[in-house]
Amino acid sequence: MNHSSRRLLAWVFVLLLVCWVVFAIARRRSASSEKDATNPDDVVSSERVNQFTALEAREQKMDQTVWAKEREAEECGRTFESLWDALNAATNKLELIAAFPVDE
C-alpha cells in the first residue's frame, strides 16, 4: 500500500470515528430529553391552559359568525373539486356529468 492510500484510509477512519461520536452524542441527548419530558417544571400552568381555552373558544365563535359564509363556500368548493378530480380520472366524462347530482 502506497503512502497516499494509507493517508486516504486514515482520513476515512477519522471521518467514521467523528460520525460515530456525533451519533452517540445525539442519541444520548435524545434519551435525556425523553427523561426530561416528565419533569414537573415542564408541565403547562393552569393559567396558560385557561388562556388557550379562551382563545380556542374565541376562534370557534369567529368561525361560526364572521367566517360562516367562507366556511360554506369552502364546503361547496370541495364538491366541485371532487367532481373535477373525478372528471380527470374518468374515461367517459359525459356519463359522469350526467350522473352528477344537481340539487340547488
Image: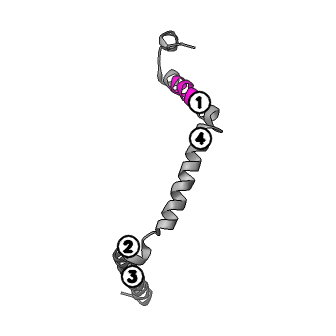
Question: Which quarter of the figure has residue 51?
Answer: bottom right
Q: Nearer the viewer, mark 3 or mark 4?
A: 4
The mark that comes first in sequence, 1 or 3, is 3
Discs 2, 3 touching: Cβ within 8 Å: no
Q: List the single residue furthest toward the bottom.
A: 3
Secondary element type, mark 4: helix
The amino acid beneath tag 4 is Asp
Q: Residue at x 48, y 14 (%)?
A: 96
Q: Which residue is mark 3?
A: 25
Cα separation, mark 4 vs mark 2, equals 34 Å
The amino acid beneath tag 1 is Glu
Relative side of 77 to 41, left or right: right
Q: Residue at x 57, y 26 (%)?
A: 76
Cα separation, mark 3 vs mark 4, equals 46 Å
The residues colored magenta run 72-85
Label tally: 4
The mark that comes first in sequence, 2 or 1, is 2
67 or 48: nearer the viewer: 48
The amino acid beneath tag 2 is Ala
Relative side of 24 to 81, left or right: left
Q: Which residue is mark 1?
A: 72
Question: Which quarter of the figure has residue 28?
Answer: bottom left
